Amino acid sequence: MMKQKLLRMKQHMGIEKEQQSTLSPPPVEEIKTNSKTIPFEEEWRAYDTNPLWFEEDYTLMREKEYSLDHKHGRYLFSELCEVVKRWQDHIYEHPLSAKGRRAEDLLFFDTETTGLSSGVGNTIFMLGYCQIQEEQVRVKQYFLPGPEAEVALYHHFLTDVGNTGNLVTFNGKAFDWPQVKTRHTFVRDQVPKLPKFGHFDLLHASRRFWKNTLPSCKLSIVEQEILQFERIEDTPSYMAPMLYFDFLQEQDPDFVKGIFQHHEWDVLSLMTLYTHLSSLLLNSVHSTQYLQRREAFEIARWYEAMGEKELSQGLYEQLLREDDEVAHLSQFAFAKAKKQSGDWRLALFLFEELVGKNHFIFEAAIECAKIYEHQYKDIEKALYFTEVARANTSSLAPHKNEKKQQIALELQQRKLRLEKKYNKK
């Protein structure tokens, strides 16, 4: 068995086949894969965690089940099934749409690693997910008991997930799945191929909805403020690597039980977060009445970015009924949409109204100047609104100085061009 392992390592390191052919084939021998002693085995089993062997090494797998009637924060797990069914009748394109999928096709996935870097020195020591299986929610966590067990870890995890259709993660596109790909390259000759998952990354959605209203878009903050789920005695993420390294020295499961619990809450919250985001998106089609106004505005912007112009403009129009920042943001976006569709009269009316709003004087004045110059050939009014814009560049405070200088130069050039046109009349 050791010779077989050495042969695999030489293949992985690129040693030429000619060298390998000089080695005599390993003798056939029977080895009991469970001959290794598992430290604290009884304690692991009492924690619903069992060894899964691959050749002479093992990974540890913890499994836990929840009823679909279990409530995690503000949602029952069964509500995931309901929103997935509603997606089937949704006629609009959206990145979070589960159209053509079942609730069982969604794998709510997360990792625990020894660091936050993306380099090869970063090791994944836990791969886990929750998924609806056989009318219940099943949580599975694959744990790396030591660096020698990485093949066993990936063999069992990848054999388990098989051809599951879609990952649902929180920053998984940028971090978790690229990390899995990196580590997989070291063991790919000995384990199954990585599935070609579709991917819903809920961090992107959370930032769209709440970056202006929450102190942070970390999952723990979203849980508490949006999902109404509060963790009790949670192990912070930054402590996980230290606790794992302590575990490697002592092998005592008590060092990492808090990490298992933290990870379990992560994947369960992904399930309810997807339910919540889907509900917001699906409900918005009928009315913004039951949505927070900022959320409704972000939904409109998102659908507009997806090319769903009719829906997004309808949402913007609904938000014009108040006189607040969201209404002004919506009016500007609605006016831009009308300008793009060639409805110059309505676009100009909306932009001129916004020139009286403090936060939009500059942007709206520029739009008015463009329409008057290019569509109505009214150079005098185009000059007037250019001067209004020049007088209100202070509203561009968030811009860097270089950007402000560029904008000032462009306004000066616009003014000079318009003055030449006006003097030729």
Image (cartoon, rainbow, N blue to C red):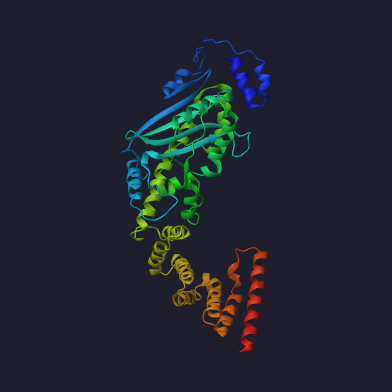
Question: In which quarter of the view is residue 4 placed?
Answer: top right
Q: Where is residue 100 in the image (x, y as percent from the top left)?
A: 37, 46
Q: Position of residue 158 (x, y in %)?
A: 48, 31
Q: Residue at x 38, y 66 (%)?
A: 318
Query: Left or right of 272: which side holds 157?
Result: right
Q: Where is residue 201 in the image (x, y as percent from the top left)?
A: 48, 46
Question: In which quarter of the view is residue 297 placed?
Answer: bottom left
Q: Where is residue 246 in the image (x, y as percent from the top left)?
A: 57, 27
Q: Does residue 23 lie above or below 12 as drawn?
A: above
Q: Does residue 222 lie above or below 155 as drawn?
A: below
Query: Left or right of 376: which side holds 74?
Result: left
Query: Left or right of 80: which side holds 36?
Result: right
Q: In which quarter of the image is the N terminus?
A: top right
Q: How many labels does the image show?
A: 0
Check the image and name the residue furthest to the bottom.
425
Foreground residue among 368 and 371: 371
Q: In which quarter of the image is the C terminus?
A: bottom right
Can residue 45 be seen in this snapshot?
yes
Q: Which residue is drawn at 50% across and 50% down?
A: 204
